[in-house]
Image (spheres, rainbow, N blue to C red):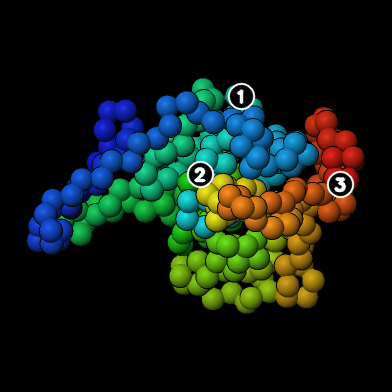
Amino acid sequence: MVDARLADGSRVNAIIPPLAIDGPSVSIRRFAVDRLVMDNLLSFGSISPPMAKFIQAAVKGELNVLISGGTGSGKTTTLNILSGFIPETQRIITIEDSAELQLQQPHVIRLETRPSNLEGKGEITQRELVKNALRMRPDRIVVGEVRGSEAVDMLSAMNTGHDGSLATIHANTPRDALSRIENMFAMAGWTISTKNLRSQIASAIHIVVQMERQEDGKRRMTSIQEINGMEGEIITMSEIFRFVRTGVNDKGDVLGRYMATGIIPECHDALVKRGIDLPIDTFND
């Protein structure tokens, strides 16, 4: 079996007997030629205008944003769109298992992991790339998907001045996303107390965005939550926006509406002080 990339960036996987019992198989994963932008999410009904305004402000204001979601929920697409709000003057380093992001800024360095060869040698993991990225004077670090021990170095970077980092994680709720990060620290062999670990997570990540592919096939941003800090050993979170389901119509389309919870995020004042236009009524339903 082999993984490869075509000249246009498409990913290829080929597998032959005896691994493929019924004969050779080739899969080609093509990426969209036209890069999606926030207006596309708005026209698809994947996000509301106030949500778009807030998340755009969060990226411009250098908050650390974690995009959570299940398989096929639109995490990478959302990450690509949000990265478009990073100023062109900043140096961005992207780290992915297979390069899919299409950043348009002039100062982008794309890093990609490498699998081991047939002898089991030569593997370069995301954790090694994150460590190397920190030596490259990045303004922003963008991780395609956090899935293992690289979470340790990613959070360390977020806690030591690399604000404005973006990453995705496979999880079904914002709370599950934080639990998965805890598990990744355990995978890396860390044995610090639960309270200290959660304190690191709470201070590193500012915003968690939840994506969901619902039964009608549409991908929606179902929740935006701000991490407030710690209360005892529990990470406290405030939901700023949510998608409220009201039912399903005869065609199988999910019905509902986006609403603001009325909570003013703690980061609002900091964003305004940075010169970002974010009126209070953005958070009123």
Closer to the eye: label 1 or 3: 3
- Which is more foreground, mark 2 or mark 3? 3
Q: Is residue 157 visible in this depiction of the protein?
A: no
Q: Residue furthest front?
A: 250
The tag earlier along the polypeptide, 1 or 2, is 2
Residue occupying image coordinates x 46% and y 37%: 101
Q: Nearer the viewer, residue 145 or 52?
A: 52
As shown in the figure, which amino acid type bears the numbered disc 2?
Answer: Thr
Residue 185 at x, y percent in the picture: 52, 67
Dot 2 or dot 3: first in sequence order is 2
Label pair 2/3, CB-CB below 8 angstroms:
no
Q: Secondary structure at mark 3?
A: loop
In-front residue for pair 93/70 = 70
Q: Name the quadrant containing residue 99.
A: top left
For label 2, the residue is: 76
Left/right of residue 5 with respect to residue 285 in the rendered view: left
Q: Earlier in the sequence, mark 1 or mark 3?
A: 1
Tag 3 residue: 285
**Helix, strand or loop at disc 1?**
loop
Image coords of residue 121 (percent x, y): 21, 56
Distance (Cα) linking label 1 and label 3: 35 Å
Counting from the top left corner in percent of width and height, residue 37 is at 59, 30
Residue type pointed to by label 1: Thr
Q: Are marks 1 and 3 in contact (CB under 8 Å)?
A: no
User: From the viewer's perspective, is the residue at label 1 or at label 2 nearer?
Assistant: 2
Which mark is on residue 89?
1
Instruction: Pick the residue in front: 275 or 55.
Output: 55
- Whole-angstrom CA distance, mark 1 to mark 2, is 23 Å
- For the point 61% across and 52% down, which residue is it? 250
Give the side of residue 142 with respect to residue 202, left or right. Answer: left
Mark 1 Cα shell of 10 Å, populated few (<14), some (14-19), many (≥20):
few
